[in-house]
Amino acid sequence: MSETRNVVIIGSGCSGHTAALYAARANLKPLVVEGHEPGGQLSLTTMVENFPGFPEGILGPQLVENMRKQAERFGAEYRTAHLTSADLGQRPFLLHLGKHQVHAQALIIASGASARWLGLPHEQQLIGHGVSSCATCDGFFFSGKEIVVVGGGDSAMEEATFLTRFASKVTIIHRRDEFRASKIMLERARGNPKIDFLTDTVVEDVYDVHKKEVTAVKLSSVKTGKTWDFPTSALFLGIGHVPNAKMFEGQLDTDADGYLKTRNYVFTRVHGVYACGDVQDRRYRQAITAAGTGCMAAMEAEKFLEEHGK
């Protein structure tokens, strides 16, 4: 079974919903493939206070649900499916959604990036309740508190340095005694009086699920095996993100970490294929910037289809 659509959007986070809204309002009847993480990373957060238009803040899942309803109101169709493979060498582009085939005249990739997690026993249960992968999103909630950042690269140093704007103390925990971070980022962190370091140490678990808040982390020494509880109000993960772009390897340009390369914001090297949101943005990773590039991608897809008489 196969079908042909004007525009197919892969992903249903901020960028995907915004692309769907603009494509639907252009009467392109877009098909949105929800992907493996419907709603994107906002669906894993609690209160969002930095998205314009919500002076009292809004819950992350509610924000993405509102976006979806708005796009559906103008004719966007959503489908629960995963993109298993894609052939961008033929036109229309051939997309495999499990056993179902869809041909797309234009393709918008808004598949996002997934945070790397530690895999702790209670980590997932406390996401949005003190466990976070985004300092910019959640740092404000821990003003005056002592918090922990895990990681040893530039991401960890950047997150920790940013968090000192709010926290009374930030402890960077790293499993080795040497850091992968660049010299300048490491020196900046080491020179900050609010930042401490715990090396040769790993996080074994995070407490306290019953209180629905982070109260401490369980640590262990890599060298001695000794374990102990370390009080903290939050656990921030600075171990990077994984862009959800593997299905396009070899067909689209990516950087060393797998993020899709774009020019002029959203253009990939294949005409008619656009990328937006966190799958191509490793720098900002914000809901508002993702929404902005989703808008751009849809507008460019509309122009592409007009130029090619679709």
Image (cartoon, rainbow, N blue to C red):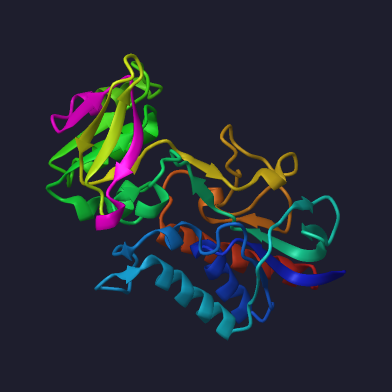
Instruction: Return the residue found at the far bottom.
Output: 73
User: Can you give x and y, in whole percent of width and height, for residue 5 in the image?
Assistant: 77, 71
Give the quarter of the figure containing the N terminus.
bottom right
Give the quarter of the figure containing the C terminus.
bottom right
The foreground one among 45 and 190 is 45
Q: Residue at x 38, y 47 (%)?
A: 122
Q: Is residue 98 above or below residue 169?
A: below
Question: Can residue 281 be seen?
Answer: no
248 falls in the magenta region: no
Q: Residue at x 20, y 41 (%)?
A: 232
The answer to whether 100 appears left or right of 68 in the picture is right
The answer to whether 40 appears left or right of 77 in the picture is left
The answer to whether 159 appears left or right of 69 in the picture is left
Question: Can residue 25 be seen?
Answer: yes
Instruction: Write down the region rendered in magenta.
Output: 189-212
User: Can you give x and y, in whole percent of width and height, for residue 132 in the image?
Assistant: 35, 49
Q: Is residue 141 above or below residue 77?
A: above
Q: Quadrant of residue 34?
A: bottom right
